[in-house]
Structures are given as C-alpha cells and as structure tokens.
Amino acid sequence: MRYALHALLLCLLLLAGCANMTPQPAAATTALLEAQLAALPAPMERPRVYGLSIAGYDRPQVFGNEARYASTVLGERYGAEDAQMLLSNDPADHERYPQANLDTLGRALRGLGARMDKDRDVLMLYMVSHGVPNGVVLKQPGRGEEELSPVWLKKTLGEAGIKYVMLAVSACFSGSFVNAFLYDPDALVLSAARQDRVSFGCSVRDEYTFFGKALLVDQDARHLDWPVLFMAASDKVMAREKEIGEKTGSVPQIHFGVELQEHLIKAGLRPGR
C-alpha cells in the first residue's frame, strides 16, 4: 500500500508537469492579451514610458524569472507600474500571462501603438531568450520554435506607429539587434552579446542571465542613464565570465540614437548634460 501511494504521488507530479507543458489555448491567449491591453493607461500631458517584457523560451525558468523582474523594476524606474505588459512562455506563467509568439507579439505592439502618443511616449521593450545569429527564439510549451528577427521587429514597430524605442535583449548573438537599429536616431538598443558571440547565464542553475543580473539586479533601479548602466553592466559581465574561465567573452553592445537621447532629456527621463 505504501509503495502504491508513492507511485500514485509520482504519477500525479508527472501529470502536473506535463499539464504545464501543454500549449496555451488560443482563446486563453487572446483573453489574457486583451486584458493587458485594456488595462493600459491613456497618454498623459507629459511623455510616458510603456513597457513590454518577453520571456521567449519555455525552459529553463531563468527566462521567466528575468522577464517578470524586468517588468517590475522597469515599471518602478519610470513610475509606470500600470503601463507594463508581459508575454511569457515560462510554464509557471501558463495561467497568468499570454504566451509569446510572433502573432501575440505583433498584436501586443499594435495595441501599444494604438494607445501611445507617437510623438511623446516611449516603449521599453525587454526580451530574454535563447538566441541565434539572426535573432531570438520564441518557444511556447508544447510547440515548435519561431525565430524573431531584428528585421521583423523593426518592421512591426514601424507598422504599429511606435517611434521611440528602448530595447534590451539578453540572448546569444543579440548584437544583431544593435546592428539592425544602428542608423535609427530614435532607438536605444542594448544587447548581451556581439552578433558573433554567445552570452551566459541561461542554465537551470541560474536565476538571471549574466547580462540581466548585471543590468537590472545589481544596479540602482532608480538610475535613468542607460550608457552609465550599460558600461557598469558590461564590466560586471566581464568579471563573471572570467570567474567561470570564459576567455572569449560575450562583448555586450549598445546603440543610443541622438534624437532619442534628446527626447529623454527634455522629458526628464534621462539626466541632462
């Protein structure tokens, strides 16, 4: 009897784990996404920062942990806790947040664009996932992979009417996003790695990626000067990589468009000169 109870408990645990790995029904995804969009505040007289954080891959849980943390800390940083959206493929978020694929991301961006004031408001987009040389990978539980390319993202942002964008990407090879926005004066792009380098901290042992921890966890959440934050984060990442014996290094990248720099200063969202 005792062994039978143990076997039953084991089966129940396995079934619970499998249930979490099933795809989110399309109707549930739509309902969760529409609820987030409906809750977004209207534009104000002064510029507002809207946030969208994405946990792109279903495993390991480091991606979900980091996306949830980014959504919270970036909302606090800009006094925009009520203007945050989150798409997550972490099975732990199955009932709480819409899952991330190209369709839901496109709908989220179009919904944000419809709510934002194009000439004043800024989108803070944070993405964490596994990466490939031409983008990041979106992997829902129980479904195949999709590739989110910088070209697709830039095109979709433009179609959504979102002008000012602050983008941070924690993934291998994420420098491809910096390269794609390199001549965009209205964009800030931070990447965890150069386009030809891997980044670190996405194992089952990690709570946050090396880059995410250095950028968001280990620094003052009230700090609004992204170049200063980025340089400090790069130094922290380099130190951690040396600790694990990594000799090549991820070489994080940054692009900060001139027009966005001036816009953030005028809006009081970045320290002036």
Image: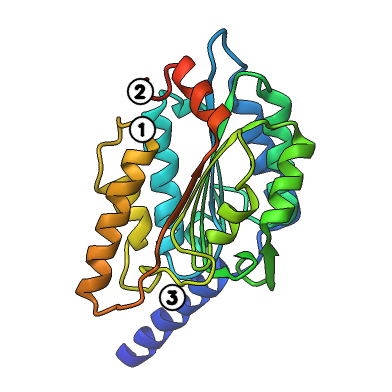
Direction from residue 75 to residue 31 in the image, left or right:
right
The percent position of residue 91, horizontal first and vertical second, equals 52, 63
Mark 3 or mark 1: name the one nearer the start of the chain. 3
Q: Which residue is more in the foreground, 266 or 113?
A: 266
The percent position of residue 165, horizontal first and vertical second, equals 59, 36
State whether residue 208 appears in this view.
no
Q: Residue at x 45, y 60 (%)?
A: 63
The amino acid type found where label 1 is placed reads: Asp
Tell me the mark number nearer the camera, choosing from 3 and 1.
1
Mark 3 or mark 2: name the one nearer the start of the chain. 3
Q: Residue at x 32, y 48 (%)?
A: 231
Q: What secondary structure is found at the residue carrying circle 2?
A: loop
Q: What secondary structure is found at the residue carrying circle 3?
A: helix
Label 3 sits on residue: 13
Q: Quadrant of residue 138?
A: bottom right
Q: Residues within 10 Å of mark 2 (few under 14, many from 20)?
A: some
Q: CA distance from mark 2 to mark 1?
A: 6 Å
Q: Which residue is more in the foreground, 216 or 65?
A: 216
Q: Quadrant of residue 73?
A: top left
The amino acid type found where label 2 is placed reads: Pro
State whether residue 206 appears in this view.
yes
Q: Quadrant of the N terminus?
A: bottom left
Q: Are marks 3 and 1 in contact (CB under 8 Å)?
A: no
The amino acid type found where label 3 is placed reads: Leu
The percent position of residue 142, horizontal first and vertical second, equals 64, 72
Q: CA distance from mark 3 to mark 1?
A: 46 Å
Marking on residue 225: 1
Q: Residues within 10 Å of mark 1 (few under 14, many from 20)?
A: some
Q: What secondary structure is found at the residue carrying circle 1?
A: loop
Q: Are marks 2 and 1 in contact (CB under 8 Å)?
A: yes
Label 2 sits on residue: 271
